[in-house]
Amino acid sequence: MSGGFSRVIARALMRHAARIMPAREMDWGAAMQNELEAIADDRVALHWAAGCLLAGYGQRANDMLQTWYVRLGVAGVIALLACREFFAPLLIFAYRMHDLGLAHFLGLRTAGDDYRRLIPVMDATPSWLPVLWVAAGLLFLIALWRMLRRSEGSVLLFFLAFALDLIGAVAAKSIEARAGVVVTPNILVRAGGEILMLSTGFLLWRMTRKGVRPVS
Amino acid sequence: MARTPNRSRQTRRLLAAMLEQPLAWRYGYELLKLTGLKSGTLYPALLRLCEQGLLEAQWRQADDPGKPPRHVYRLTRAGLAFAREQIVPAGEKAGVLLEAKA
C-alpha cells in the first residue's frame, strides 16, 4: 500500500462518501471506508472509492425521496399534470355548452389569451379525444392517491396516463394541422410538459421501488 | 409499501457467492472479487439484504495491527432459505452465475 496520488484521492472520495450516507447508515459509510484500507492496489482502491461515492449519493437520494417534502412536491406536480389533462376538455365543454363566460376565463390561460382563436380546433375535435384526456387526468389522480397511500401500482397508472396523454397529443397535432391553428406555438412549453411528466414518472418509480424503505 | 426482497441479477449473483460457503463470514472486498460487482452496486445490495434480515453484518478486528476494523457479512437462516430458493429453482448453479461476472 502506498500514499500515492490515487490513494489520496480515493481516501478523500471515501471520506465524502461516508459523510453523505444517511445518518442511520453511518455505520455502512464507515464499513466502506475501512474496507478501502484492505485494498493494496491504489487503482483498485480508487475504483472502489468512486463506486462507494455513487452508492453514498444513491442512498442519500433514496432517503430524500422518502421525505415528506419531496413526496409533497411530487404529489403537487402530479396534481398539476391532472389539471392540465382536464383543461382542454373543460374548455371544449364550455364552448360547446355555450358557457362563454367560462370559455373566456379559460381562454385567458391559453396562448393568445383568447378562446376564439381555438374555435376551429374545438369544432374539429372528435368527442373521444376529451374523453381520453379526462381518462388520463383521472389516472394521474388515482396514481397520486396510491402514491400518498403508499400502495402499489402508482407508477403503472402514472405511465398509463402518460401514454394516453401522448396518444392525445398526436391526435391533437393532426387536428391542429387540419384546422390550421397551433394551440401552443412555443415548442419549449410543449416539450416542457412531456419532460416534466417523464421526470415525475422517474421520481415516482424511484420512490416506490420495491425494497426502498419509507422513512416518513 | 411492503418491502419485498430484490431479485435482480446482481443480487442473485451476490447470493450465489454467499451460498458457496454459507456459514463463512465474508468481507466486502472479498465479495466484490467473488461476484465481479462494482462497489457502487455491491454495498447498496448488501445494505438492502441486511435490512431485509437476509444477511447479518458485524465488525471484525483487522488481522494486521494498525488497520481499522472491517465489516463482515453472512447469510442468516432466512437468507439461506431465500438464496436457495432464488438460485436453485432457476437452474442457476452458484458457479454459473459467478462465471457470468460483468
Image: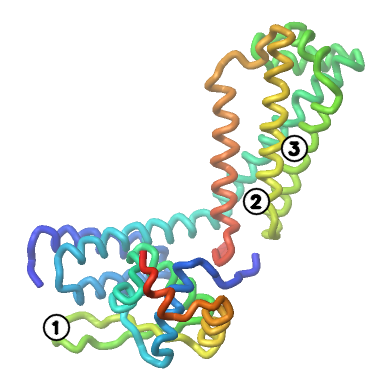
* Image height of A29 relative to A170, above or below: below
Which quadrant of the figure has residue A133?
top right
Q: Residue furthest bottom?
A: B23
Q: Looking at the rendering, in which quadrant would you find the C terminus of chain A?
A: bottom right
- Splitting the image into 4 quarters, where does residue A84 fall? top right
Query: What x and y, as percent, mark residue A200?
Result: 58, 42
Q: Which residue is mark 1?
A: B66
Q: Amino acid at mark 3?
A: Ala
Marks 1/3 in contact by CB < 8 Å: the verdict is: no
Residue at 14 percent across and 65 percent down: it is A42
Please give left or right for residue A95 compared with residue A56 in the image: right
**Foreground: B19 or A117?**
B19
Crowding near the residue tagged with mark 3, few <14, some 14–19, many ≥20 C-alpha atoms within 10 Å: many
The location of residue A105, given as percent across then percent down, is 77, 16
Q: Nearer the viewer, mark 2 or mark 1?
A: 2
Residue at position x 83%, y 12% in the image: A123
Q: In the image, what residue type sits under mark 2?
A: Val
Is there one chain holding both mark 1 and mark 3? no
Residue receiving disc 2: A155
Quick check: A117 left or right of B43? right
Query: Residue A14 in the image: x percent, y percent?
Result: 25, 63
Judge the density around disc 2: few (<14), some (14-19), many (≥20) Cα neighbours within 10 Å: many
For label 3, the residue is: A136
